[in-house]
Amino acid sequence: MRFISVRNMSGWIRETGPETIIAGLVDALAVDFARWERFEREPRIASHSPIGVIELMPTSDGELYAFKYVNGHPDNPAQGFQTVTAFGVLADVLTGYPLFLSEMTLLTALRTAATSGLAARVLARPDSDRMAMIGAGSQAEFQALAIRSQLGITKLRLFDTDAGAAEATARNLRPLGFDVTVEASAADAARDADVITTCTADKSNAVVLRADEVRPGTHINAIGGDCPGKTELDIALVRDNRVFIEHEPQTRIEGEIQKLPADSPVTELWTVIDGRAPGRVSAEEVTVFDSVGFAIEDFTALRFARDATSGTRFSEQIDLIAEPDDPKNLFGMVGSPVPVV
């Protein structure tokens, strides 16, 4: 089976360019969102602890099966570990054989950004020209590149409670052509923004963006809420505006809408992509994409990475699946029985 290591994933991204890959992923996601109903869809399988979560995210389109293993541990950086790590597998439904194994810590950052980019492409005002980023963690640079790839935005206001993290993100983005200012508060960052992305790590029902800080016509990508008891938005933002989601049964558990009644109206984003539901209906409307990440996005990312790296030095063959000469004689791979004397 084929394998992309962390080293090769990093090399592929560097050589191709993260914005180019993200833009390609946005297009690939649009294709798979348009055939959403062909996929198996179920909330991720989560194992929660007081300090984090470990999850499996499976899906299949009937031809390929995919799953991702991912964790989320907000306190990890204080111990020298990353908040999120991941890997994923693609398998052939016909034989059950795994076909492709990949690191997904970097790939998840790309696919999460691409999903935000897809939402912005169909929900943000086309004339949007200023972005706010609340939270300057591992996702920040990827999110900025995704929005630029779809809307051309280069003006960015950035806020994080860790001023050092915000300054580091600004230093990373400025050489890439972004006009970045680091702000003293979320309200300052959101001022006059056309697109706002919230991506914070604290595992709590926090309010990092208030309704009175959002002007008419804004699109919000709320991507930090991704488990029970973890939210980012003022409840008024999700109660009083149109909310777009990935998969309702999962988002009701993990997203911003976990704070709302179970019958509160929401729109799954795939229905906008395939034309069943309207996206933005006016220039003054505030739209909210309540994104928690879903297995179909990982399926798309894995297939995209497999195809994009096929035949390159970034994808290698590994010996993971036992293949005895006689498929009914597995023991033959480890030797003959020891004769009994």
Image: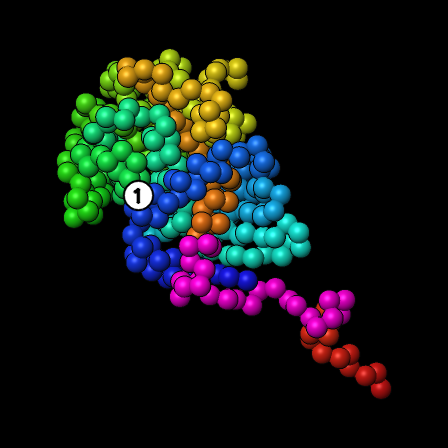
Residue 191 in magenta stretch:
no
Image height check: is 336 above or below 108? below
Image height check: is 46 above or below 281? below
Closer to the camera in the image, 260 or 75: 260
The residue at the point 43 percent across, 42 percent down is: 28
Image height check: is 205 above or below 15? above
Check disc 1 and report the residue beneath it.
Answer: 142
The quarter holding residue 323 reads bottom right
Residue 85 pos. (x, y %)? 42, 49
Q: Which residue is farthest front?
A: 275
Image quadrant holding the C terminus, namely bottom right
Please, which colouring scheme is shown? rainbow
Q: Secondary structure at mark 1?
A: helix
Main secondary structure along the magenta-highlighted residues = loop
The reply to whether residue 3 is in sight is yes
The quarter holding residue 242 reads top left
Image quadrant holding the N terminus, namely bottom right
Q: Which residue is farthest top?
A: 240
Image height check: is 35 above or below 239? below
Look at label 1 and name its amino acid: Phe
Mark 1, other Cα within 10 Å: few <14 / some 14–19 / many ≥20: many
The residue at the point 49 percent across, 33 percent down is: 34
The reply to whether residue 204 is in sight is no
Residue 263 pos. (x, y %)? 53, 15
The residue at the point 52 percent across, 66 percent down is: 318
Q: Which residue is farthest right?
A: 341
Residue extent of the magenta highlight: 306-329
Number of numbered markers: 1
The quarter holding residue 240 reads top left
Residue 326 in magenta stretch:
yes
Q: Is residue 231 left or right of residue 58?
A: left
Q: Is residue 250 left or right of residue 279?
A: right
